Amino acid sequence: MHRLIRIVTGMSVVTLLLWPTPTQAQGRPIALAVTRADMSALRVVDQQVDQLLRSGDLRMRESVLDSLVPDRTHQRLDQYVRGVRIVGGDITRQTAADGTVSIFGMMHDASAVSTTPALNVDAARTAIANVVAGQLIGDAPELVLLPLSDGDHLAYFGRARVGFDLVNVFVDANDASLLQRYSEYISDVGVGVGAYGDQ
Protein backbone atom coordinates (compact mmCIF):
# COMPACT_ATOMS: atom_id res chain seq x y z
CA MET A 1 0.00 0.00 0.00
CA HIS A 2 2.83 2.42 0.87
CA ARG A 3 4.46 1.66 -2.49
CA LEU A 4 1.23 2.50 -4.31
CA ILE A 5 0.95 5.83 -2.46
CA ARG A 6 4.56 6.66 -3.40
CA ILE A 7 3.86 5.84 -7.06
CA VAL A 8 0.73 8.01 -7.10
CA THR A 9 2.60 10.86 -5.41
CA GLY A 10 5.46 10.51 -7.88
CA MET A 11 3.01 10.63 -10.78
CA SER A 12 1.50 13.80 -9.36
CA VAL A 13 4.91 15.48 -9.25
CA VAL A 14 5.64 14.40 -12.84
CA THR A 15 2.23 15.69 -13.91
CA LEU A 16 2.97 19.08 -12.38
CA LEU A 17 6.37 19.24 -14.06
CA LEU A 18 4.81 18.44 -17.44
CA TRP A 19 1.75 20.70 -17.14
CA PRO A 20 1.78 22.93 -20.24
CA THR A 21 2.39 26.60 -19.70
CA PRO A 22 2.16 29.36 -22.30
CA THR A 23 5.95 29.40 -22.74
CA GLN A 24 6.51 25.65 -22.62
CA ALA A 25 6.32 23.59 -25.81
CA GLN A 26 4.76 20.14 -25.53
CA GLY A 27 4.87 17.51 -28.24
CA ARG A 28 2.51 14.96 -26.76
CA PRO A 29 -0.63 15.18 -24.64
CA ILE A 30 -0.24 15.12 -20.87
CA ALA A 31 -2.36 12.75 -18.80
CA LEU A 32 -3.63 14.41 -15.64
CA ALA A 33 -4.50 12.35 -12.57
CA VAL A 34 -4.48 14.24 -9.28
CA THR A 35 -6.54 13.59 -6.16
CA ARG A 36 -6.64 14.57 -2.51
CA ALA A 37 -3.95 11.93 -1.91
CA ASP A 38 -1.56 14.77 -2.84
CA MET A 39 -3.23 18.02 -1.76
CA SER A 40 -0.38 20.31 -2.83
CA ALA A 41 -0.42 18.89 -6.38
CA LEU A 42 -4.21 19.07 -6.49
CA ARG A 43 -4.19 22.73 -5.45
CA VAL A 44 -1.68 23.68 -8.15
CA VAL A 45 -3.52 21.84 -10.95
CA ASP A 46 -6.88 23.16 -9.70
CA GLN A 47 -5.59 26.74 -9.89
CA GLN A 48 -4.30 26.14 -13.41
CA VAL A 49 -7.66 24.71 -14.49
CA ASP A 50 -9.37 27.82 -13.11
CA GLN A 51 -6.90 30.03 -14.99
CA LEU A 52 -7.55 28.15 -18.26
CA LEU A 53 -11.30 28.51 -17.70
CA ARG A 54 -10.92 32.26 -17.28
CA SER A 55 -8.83 32.53 -20.47
CA GLY A 56 -11.26 30.42 -22.50
CA ASP A 57 -8.70 27.68 -23.19
CA LEU A 58 -10.97 25.38 -21.19
CA ARG A 59 -14.76 25.61 -21.48
CA MET A 60 -17.47 23.96 -19.42
CA ARG A 61 -19.32 21.32 -21.45
CA GLU A 62 -21.52 20.20 -18.56
CA SER A 63 -21.79 20.15 -14.79
CA VAL A 64 -23.76 17.28 -13.26
CA LEU A 65 -24.51 16.15 -9.73
CA ASP A 66 -23.13 12.76 -8.72
CA SER A 67 -26.04 10.34 -8.43
CA LEU A 68 -24.23 8.14 -5.90
CA VAL A 69 -22.27 10.52 -3.66
CA PRO A 70 -24.19 13.41 -2.07
CA ASP A 71 -22.85 16.95 -2.56
CA ARG A 72 -20.47 15.89 -5.35
CA THR A 73 -20.43 17.57 -8.76
CA HIS A 74 -18.65 16.49 -11.94
CA GLN A 75 -17.52 19.25 -14.27
CA ARG A 76 -16.63 18.15 -17.78
CA LEU A 77 -14.37 20.64 -19.54
CA ASP A 78 -13.24 20.83 -23.18
CA GLN A 79 -9.89 22.27 -24.23
CA TYR A 80 -9.71 24.92 -26.96
CA VAL A 81 -6.90 26.65 -28.81
CA ARG A 82 -7.76 30.08 -30.26
CA GLY A 83 -11.44 29.17 -30.20
CA VAL A 84 -11.03 25.75 -31.86
CA ARG A 85 -11.98 22.66 -29.82
CA ILE A 86 -9.32 19.98 -29.42
CA VAL A 87 -10.79 16.51 -29.95
CA GLY A 88 -9.92 14.39 -26.91
CA GLY A 89 -8.69 17.42 -24.95
CA ASP A 90 -11.06 17.07 -22.05
CA ILE A 91 -10.84 17.19 -18.28
CA THR A 92 -13.19 16.02 -15.55
CA ARG A 93 -13.05 17.86 -12.24
CA GLN A 94 -14.92 16.45 -9.25
CA THR A 95 -15.87 18.96 -6.58
CA ALA A 96 -17.50 18.81 -3.17
CA ALA A 97 -18.75 21.40 -0.70
CA ASP A 98 -15.22 21.70 0.73
CA GLY A 99 -13.43 22.06 -2.61
CA THR A 100 -11.99 20.03 -5.46
CA VAL A 101 -11.71 16.28 -4.94
CA SER A 102 -9.96 15.13 -8.13
CA ILE A 103 -8.95 16.15 -11.65
CA PHE A 104 -8.49 13.67 -14.50
CA GLY A 105 -8.04 14.10 -18.22
CA MET A 106 -5.77 14.86 -21.16
CA MET A 107 -4.14 18.22 -21.88
CA HIS A 108 -2.71 19.11 -25.29
CA ASP A 109 -0.36 21.89 -26.25
CA ALA A 110 -1.35 22.85 -29.77
CA SER A 111 -0.24 26.46 -29.58
CA ALA A 112 2.01 26.09 -32.65
CA VAL A 113 -0.76 24.72 -34.90
CA SER A 114 -2.49 27.12 -37.29
CA THR A 115 -6.24 27.39 -36.74
CA THR A 116 -6.98 29.13 -40.05
CA PRO A 117 -8.54 26.68 -42.52
CA ALA A 118 -8.14 26.80 -46.29
CA LEU A 119 -11.66 25.37 -46.74
CA ASN A 120 -14.80 27.26 -45.79
CA VAL A 121 -17.80 25.56 -44.18
CA ASP A 122 -19.60 24.99 -47.48
CA ALA A 123 -16.55 23.29 -48.96
CA ALA A 124 -16.27 21.19 -45.80
CA ARG A 125 -19.90 20.05 -46.20
CA THR A 126 -19.15 18.87 -49.71
CA ALA A 127 -15.88 17.21 -48.68
CA ILE A 128 -17.48 15.24 -45.84
CA ALA A 129 -20.26 13.96 -48.08
CA ASN A 130 -17.82 13.08 -50.87
CA VAL A 131 -15.21 11.18 -48.85
CA VAL A 132 -17.82 8.75 -47.48
CA ALA A 133 -20.17 8.84 -50.47
CA GLY A 134 -23.00 9.81 -48.15
CA GLN A 135 -25.26 12.66 -47.09
CA LEU A 136 -24.21 15.19 -44.45
CA ILE A 137 -26.70 15.41 -41.58
CA GLY A 138 -27.07 17.65 -38.55
CA ASP A 139 -25.43 20.99 -37.92
CA ALA A 140 -22.73 22.65 -40.00
CA PRO A 141 -19.32 20.96 -39.82
CA GLU A 142 -17.30 21.98 -36.76
CA LEU A 143 -13.74 23.22 -37.12
CA VAL A 144 -11.65 21.18 -34.67
CA LEU A 145 -8.08 20.19 -33.92
CA LEU A 146 -7.66 16.42 -34.32
CA PRO A 147 -4.58 14.88 -32.64
CA LEU A 148 -3.41 11.79 -34.54
CA SER A 149 -0.27 9.64 -34.30
CA ASP A 150 1.45 11.79 -36.94
CA GLY A 151 0.61 15.09 -35.24
CA ASP A 152 -2.22 17.59 -34.84
CA HIS A 153 -4.47 18.26 -37.82
CA LEU A 154 -6.86 21.14 -38.36
CA ALA A 155 -10.04 19.39 -39.45
CA TYR A 156 -13.75 19.70 -40.00
CA PHE A 157 -15.96 17.26 -38.12
CA GLY A 158 -19.38 16.24 -39.33
CA ARG A 159 -21.85 13.36 -39.36
CA ALA A 160 -23.06 11.65 -42.50
CA ARG A 161 -25.62 9.03 -43.44
CA VAL A 162 -24.11 6.26 -45.54
CA GLY A 163 -26.81 3.76 -46.46
CA PHE A 164 -28.25 2.65 -43.12
CA ASP A 165 -25.14 3.70 -41.20
CA LEU A 166 -24.35 6.97 -39.38
CA VAL A 167 -20.67 7.84 -39.52
CA ASN A 168 -18.56 10.48 -37.81
CA VAL A 169 -16.16 12.02 -40.29
CA PHE A 170 -13.05 14.20 -39.98
CA VAL A 171 -11.67 15.81 -43.13
CA ASP A 172 -8.53 17.90 -43.40
CA ALA A 173 -9.48 21.59 -43.25
CA ASN A 174 -6.85 22.46 -45.84
CA ASP A 175 -6.97 19.76 -48.52
CA ALA A 176 -10.33 18.00 -47.83
CA SER A 177 -8.68 14.57 -47.44
CA LEU A 178 -10.21 12.00 -45.11
CA LEU A 179 -8.43 11.91 -41.74
CA GLN A 180 -10.73 9.63 -39.76
CA ARG A 181 -14.17 8.03 -39.89
CA TYR A 182 -16.05 5.73 -37.54
CA SER A 183 -19.57 4.42 -37.27
CA GLU A 184 -21.96 5.43 -34.51
CA TYR A 185 -23.25 1.88 -34.48
CA ILE A 186 -21.60 -1.04 -32.77
CA SER A 187 -22.22 -4.37 -34.41
CA ASP A 188 -21.19 -7.80 -33.27
CA VAL A 189 -22.10 -11.32 -34.29
CA GLY A 190 -22.62 -13.97 -31.65
CA VAL A 191 -23.83 -17.56 -31.45
CA GLY A 192 -25.83 -18.99 -28.58
CA VAL A 193 -28.26 -21.72 -27.62
CA GLY A 194 -31.93 -20.81 -27.36
CA ALA A 195 -34.50 -21.97 -24.78
CA TYR A 196 -35.39 -24.99 -26.91
CA GLY A 197 -31.82 -26.04 -27.60
CA ASP A 198 -31.72 -24.38 -30.99
CA GLN A 199 -28.68 -22.44 -32.16
Image (cartoon, helix red, strand yellow):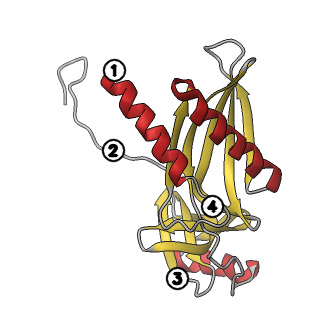
For disc 2, the marked residue is 188
Q: CA distance from mark 3 to mark 4?
A: 19 Å
Closer mark to the observer between disc 3 and disc 2: 3
- What amino acid is at disc 3? Ser
- The disc, 3 or 4, on the residue closer to the chain's N-terminal end is 4
- What amino acid is at disc 2? Asp
- The disc, 3 or 2, on the residue closer to the chain's N-terminal end is 3
- The disc, 1 or 2, on the residue closer to the chain's N-terminal end is 1
Toward the top, the furthest residue is 70
Relative to 115, say whether 119 is above or below.
below
Q: At 75% from the left edge and 17% from the top edge, which residue is drawn? A: 97
For disc 4, the marked residue is 86
- The disc, 2 or 4, on the residue closer to the chain's N-terminal end is 4
Relative to 107, say whether 134 is above or below.
below
Q: CA distance from mark 1 to mark 4?
A: 37 Å
The numbered mark at residue 2 is 1
- What amino acid is at disc 4? Ile
Closer mark to the observer between disc 3 and disc 4: 4
